[in-house]
Every structure is written in C-alpha cells, then in structure tokens.
Image (cartoon, rainbow, N blue to C red):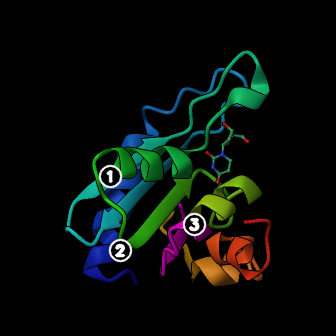
Amino acid sequence: MMDAETKELWQAAVKVRQNAYTPYSHFKVGAALLAASGKIYCGCNIENASYGLTCCAERNAIFAAVCAGERDFKALCVVADSDKPVAPCGACRQVIAEFGIPKVVMSNLQGDIKIMTAEELLPYSFNAASMDEKGEK
Ligand code: THU
C-alpha cells in the first residue's frame, strides 16, 4: 500500500509518462519529484535519432526542478510499464546522488513499489566532497 504522498507522486509520474517521446525504444517512463517547497516537478524520457542523446525521465524531472530554483528534494517516483518496479540507470543515479534524494520510489503501472535512498542506489559515489579531499588547488 502506498502512503498519500507516494500515491500523489506516482499518479503524477503515470500522467507525465504519457508524454514520453519514445519512437525508438517504445519504452515510456515517467518521473515525479517532490521538492521541499511542496511543489511537484515532472519529467518523461525524450529520445533522439542519435540514440545517445536520449534523456531519461528522472533527469528531466530533476533538471526541470533545478531550473525552477529548487535544490532540496523529498522524494522521486519513477514509473514504467515493467513487470518489476523500474530501476534508474547509472547516469540518473549519479544525478540523484548529486542532490541526495532521500527517497526514490521505483514503480510500475500496477503500482508495485520498491523504495531506496540515493546512497543505496549509488554507494561510494563520486561527489563534491571527493574533490575537496585532495586535489590541485
Ligand atoms: N529510461 C528512463 O527514462 N528511465 C529509466 O529509469 C530507465 C530508462 C529510458 C531511456 C530510454 O528512452 C528508454 O527508457 C529505454 O532505455
């Protein structure tokens, strides 16, 4: 069972997923991000004929929020039409780690969920502190 906050995020992610631009993979993903301000920012995956330029739903949601001036996040929900809750790719994990998102809700259209922290998704990550430890100043 989802709590009210998770359900609201999941519903937003399911809705934005419909806008996914996926002529190549046909795998549509939606993401909804709850900022500390209380606002929800959404993203879907957007593919490109030059495949590597594709941007995932999670990064589009996080980048939309940062463009709006947000830095502090409470939860991110990602949804796809998959048997198991969809797992963020490695690049998105690095971006999730950058903002230390404490609750990442992975889900599918059936409403199955798996919840992990940024640290659990990407342990021992490269981050701002990594550069402070020792570097050429
Ligand atoms: N994708 C996402 O948007 N998020 C994920 O968590 C996994 C993968 C997208 C990228 C690409 O458009 C499609 O799913 C297939 O890899």
Q: Mark 3 belongs to which amino acid?
A: Glu
Give the residues drawn in magenta, as a range.
97-108
Residue at x 44% of width, y 49% of height: 61
Marks 3 and 2 in Cβ contact (< 8 Å)? no
Ligand 1 closer than 8 Å to label 2 CB: no
Residue 120 falls in which quadrant of the image?
bottom right
Q: In the displayed structure, would residue 88 be above or below residue 74?
A: above
- Image coordinates of residue 69 in percent, x first then y, are 28, 52
Q: Check contact, mark 1 vs mark 2: CB within 8 A.
A: no
Camera-side mark, 3 or 2: 3
Q: Residue drawn 67% across and 71% down?
A: 127
The x and y percentages for residue 114 are 58, 78
Q: Residues within 10 Å of mark 1 (few under 14, many from 20)?
A: many
Q: Position of residue 3 (x, y in %)?
A: 32, 83
Tell me, for residue 41, which label it has, or none: 1
Residue depth check, mark 1 versus mark 2: number of the one nearer the observer: 1
- State left or right for residue 72 relative to residue 131: left
What secondary structure is marked by label 2?
Answer: helix
Assign ligand 1 to one image quadrant. Answer: top right
**Mark 2 — residue?**
6
Find disc 3 in the rendering and name its residue.
98
| In the image, residue 82 above or below residue 87 | above
